[in-house]
Image: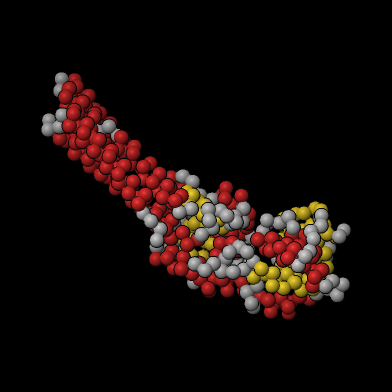
Amino acid sequence: WATWIVVIALSAAALTWIFRGEIIRAVTILVVFCPCAFILATPTAVLAGIGNAAKYGMIVRSGNALERLSKIKRIAFDKTGTLTYGKPQVTAAVSVNNAFSDADVLRIAALTEQKSEHPLGKAIVSAYQQKGGILETTENFRVIAGQGVSAKVDGKTVFAGKKDFMLARDIDVAAAASDVKAELEKGATIIYLAAEHTLLGFIALRDTLREDAKETLEKLKTLGITPMLLTGDNEHAARAIAESVGIEDVRANLLPEEKMNVIKGYAGSSEPICMVGDGVNDALALSSADAGIAMGGIGSDIAVESADAVLVSDDIKRLPYLFGLMKKVMKKVQVNIIVSLIINLTAVLLSAFGILTPVTGALWHNFGSVFVVVNAALLLRLKDK
């Protein structure tokens, strides 16, 4: 608005001088205040920032996304595939039903999960195949987001998922309580398995923490960004990961809608929040946050589509550089606009007093345009150390 007011005022002044016959002064003012520098000030810096980020494997979708990323004060991480490598390993397959062996539990779980896109489901299938298992055709596969899956295996409807998923279907999991407790204390994630309404057993899985996760979060804290953990995993596994990387705010056993509600509590507030996730379960939270960042390599298509930025190589150690770069881009924009305004207003005053002619005024104006372009181009020289 301020720019438009100045433009209108100067245009009126130029018209007044034209009517008075002072054509040289009028033309000079119009030349020097041509808003090219203002037009260049923002997009040149934004494009330079987006280009620099892309060089290091971070795709920022737009200038609007860049601006929102620059204002982030809190960042929420999913656990599996984000703070961890997203490649969990099956550590145990335990049967609690005398009619089935541990091997049977792994087989049925793998057949049930074979169409799943979740890292835990893929890990179960991989473990079964590594033992020489052959995947057979199943029917009626369904995904209950954030809870589990179901499919028809050997003529029976089989459920695989969280404890709450089982309890909601009146499946008693008490028979596995002692074995499950021992696995949970080791930081494992538990997938229960049931046929119809009978518990067959469970699968225990553990993921590996990313080597650079702790250092990354420490750098984010130095930038004034507070980390938190939002996961659908159990409390024990979530706490084990959080303590390893120094996260104090932990929310576990969350459904996708509950993640979204937590995010909405911060979105648009004085503490703008960014969500970092990789799966279908994170899509609602990613789209509800002030800014969303998806893991591009192992992330699901819907998570990538819902995000404002994508880490192409799933390298979260780039995050501190990304946020730092976005802040520098916005500072460049501010400097470009202020300097352009000063240069043009100075030229207007000089032309009004007859010091600048149309020719020297055009040169002065071009100096302002060159300045903002060169100043923005300096962003391309920044490096992620």
Side of 223 where 149 appears, left or right: right
Residue, x 82% and y 64% (percent of image)? 195
Quarter of the image for the C terminus: give it. bottom left
- Name which quarter of the figure residue 113 lies in: bottom right
Identified at 18% across, 28% down, the residue is 358
- Its colouring scheme is secondary structure
In the rendered image, residue 83, in percent from the top left (x then y), is placed at 55, 65
- 290 up-or-down from 235: above or below: above
Q: Toward the viewer: 115 or 336? A: 115
Position of 327 with respect to 133 (left or right) is left
Q: Nearer the viewer, residue 127 or 26?
A: 127
Q: Nearer the viewer, residue 157 or 259?
A: 157
Q: On the rendered structure, is 230 left or right of 92?
A: left
- Image coordinates of residue 339 in percent, x first then y, are 25, 44
Confirm whether residue 174 shows in the render. Answer: no
Q: Can residue 111 be seen in the rendering of this structure?
A: yes
Q: Residue at horizontal 77%, vertical 65%?
A: 132
